[in-house]
């Protein structure tokens, strides 16, 4: 199934809808930064998409550059921008929006997408994803590989622990209780199986924002100039996260690696994990046990921040390159292709019309879990994004990790994070 779907993206099936394959004498050349380490199925999918687009558009040549992690990609893109040799096109975090604007690195998409058809296309993206794509009355990014956080649970381990294997915990209290029952400890105190793993590295702030959202607390304003890290609801959310280990003994103490959390789930070292829905295809392909996918548990209400990457067009490029970049973005986000991308990767198809395609309808019948992240958008909030976002999120991450390792109390950690964020953002509020 998955191999067939990848071929649908990377193969020849999409070409039939387009014209000839003659090579243009002087094609417009685009350098495209994509945030993933070289290798693996996702890069093959991107390579296939680029090749397929080139066949359909012989006057445009795309060079995909795999720039590392999201964090490495934004650094490389801005370094290239400052040196005068930026990419023309990049997929970077939606939360890099303010940083890219502050560096005068990108062009508003709606200045390129100016026709009535273009505007209709832009209006087709889910509002939850556009919240991290627009500011100041302009659209700066186009949602591509977007996500929400979801919870995976191992149905076999639930059944073994006397829990209903078909029902995930729906509240914080239920998750803590289930986590206790699912944790296995031997006589020497060694844990062979944790009830719940929530990553504390990589995207610590993202996991925390989910808890804060469920506790009815926003972490920033829409202008990206103010944070609310030390609000009572945020402190309560962090205390619950700390207590999963310190009080309930349902989660590991200290660091839980972002990159290995899905592997721990697949190896049945964790009965429940929080991670991006972008891991759905990986887990479906490799799980040796039945599993479920659920919205994150609620406290005051359900909730998750959105996440993932947007397309951006860099402004140090010719009008012809910008026009070509927009053409590729539109091509990559058309309903059928957006559906195929979602099926191949697990990311959320970013438009309703993608979910209306025959391919996606069939996929949802076979894999109902794929609709969980989309349905959770009703309770979603924009991912934490501010001016000087890298420094602000680092200040928050460092203090969250200090609380999770026991070096600071939750109240002190978030007070320190807020003070540092205030210092960093002071100039943006003038």
Image (cartoon, rainbow, N blue to C red):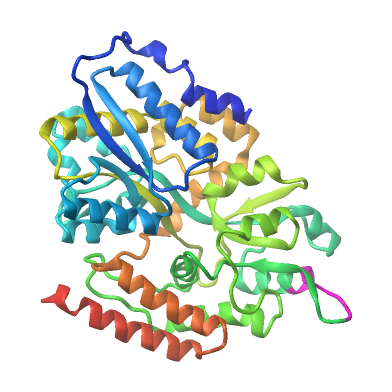
Answer left or right for 398 relative to 102.
right
Where on the picture, by quarter, is residue 337? top left
Q: Residue at x 58, y 35 (%)?
A: 364
Segment colored magenta: 180-187
Q: For residue 405, what is the image quadrant?
A: bottom right
Q: Which image quadrant: the N terminus?
A: top right
Estimate the x, y position of residue 125 in percent, counting from the top left.
33, 41
Q: Number of marks in the image?
A: 0
- Residue 149 screen position, x and y as percent: 51, 57
State yes or no: residue 183 in magenta.
yes
Q: Is residue 297 above or below residue 42?
A: below
Vertical position of residue 427 compared to residue 280: above or below: below
Q: Residue at position x 78%, y 60% from top? A: 158
Q: Left or right: 156 with respect to 391?
A: right
Q: Residue at x 42, y 56 (%)?
A: 306
Q: Give the percent coordinates (x, y) of residue 399.
A: 44, 82
**Furthest residue toward right:** 187
From the top left corner, tell me how far across and down residue 36 is, in percent.
45, 47
Location of the C terminus by quadrant is bottom left
Vertical arrangement, residue 50 with respect to residue 57, above or below: below
Q: Taking the image as drawn, is residue 131 in sight? A: no
The structure residue drawn at horizontal position 43% and vertical position 31%, both measured from the top left corner, is: 47
Residue 47 in view, yes or no: yes
Relative side of 118 to 146, left or right:
left
Does the magenta segment cover residue 38? no
């Amino acid at each position: 199934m998955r191999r067939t779907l990848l071929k649908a993206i990377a193969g020849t099936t999409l070409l039939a809808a387009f014209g000839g394959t003659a090579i243009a004498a002087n094609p417009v050349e685009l350098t495209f930064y994509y945030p993933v380490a070289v290798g693996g199925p996702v890069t093959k999918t991107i390579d296939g998409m680029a090749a397929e687009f080139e066949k359909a558009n012989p006057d445009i040549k795309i060079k995909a550059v795999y720039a590392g992690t999201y964090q490495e990609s934004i650094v490389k893109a801005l370094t290239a921008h400052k040196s005068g040799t930026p990419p023309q096109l990049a997929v970077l975090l939606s939360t890099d929006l303010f940083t890219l604007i502050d560096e005068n690195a990108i062009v508003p998409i709606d200045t390129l997408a100016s026709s009535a058809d273009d505007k209709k296309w832009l209006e087709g993206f889910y509002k939850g994803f556009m919240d991290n794509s627009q500011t100041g009355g302009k659209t700066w990014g186009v949602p591509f590989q977007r996500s929400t956080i979801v919870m995976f649970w191992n149905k076999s381990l639930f059944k073994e622990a006397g829990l209903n294997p078909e029902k995930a915990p729906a509240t914080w209290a239920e998750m803590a209780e289930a986590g206790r029952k699912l944790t296995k400890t031997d006589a020497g105190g060694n844990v062979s199986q944790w009830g719940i793993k929530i990553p504390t590295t990589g995207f610590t702030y993202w996991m925390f924002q989910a808890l804060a959202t469920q506790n009815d607390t926003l972490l920033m304003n829409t202008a990206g100039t103010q944070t609310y890290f030390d609000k009572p609801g945020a402190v309560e959310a962090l205390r619950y996260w700390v207590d999963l280990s310190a009080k309930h003994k349902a989660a590991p103490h200290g660091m839980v690696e972002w990159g290995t959390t899905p592997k721990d789930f697949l190896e049945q070292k964790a009965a429940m994990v929080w991670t991006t829905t972008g891991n759905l295809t990986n887990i479906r392909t490799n799980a040796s046990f039945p599993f479920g996918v659920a919205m994150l548990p609620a406290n005051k209400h359900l909730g998750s921040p959105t996440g993932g990457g947007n397309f951006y067009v860099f402004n140090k490029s010719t009008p012809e390159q910008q026009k070509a970049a927009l053409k590729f973005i539109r091509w990559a986000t058309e309903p059928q292709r957006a559906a195929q991308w979602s099926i191949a990767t697990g990311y959320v198809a970013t438009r309703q019309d993608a979910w209306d395609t025959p391919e996606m309808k069939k996929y949802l019948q076979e894999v109902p879990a794929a609709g969980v992240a989309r349905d959770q958008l009703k309770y979603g909030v924009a991912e934490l994004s501010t001016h000087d976002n890298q420094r602000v999120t680092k200040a928050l991450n460092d203090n969250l990790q200090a609380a999770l390792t026991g070096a600071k109390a939750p109240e002190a950690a978030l007070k320190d994070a807020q003070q540092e964020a205030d210092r960093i953002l002071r100039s943006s509020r003038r």
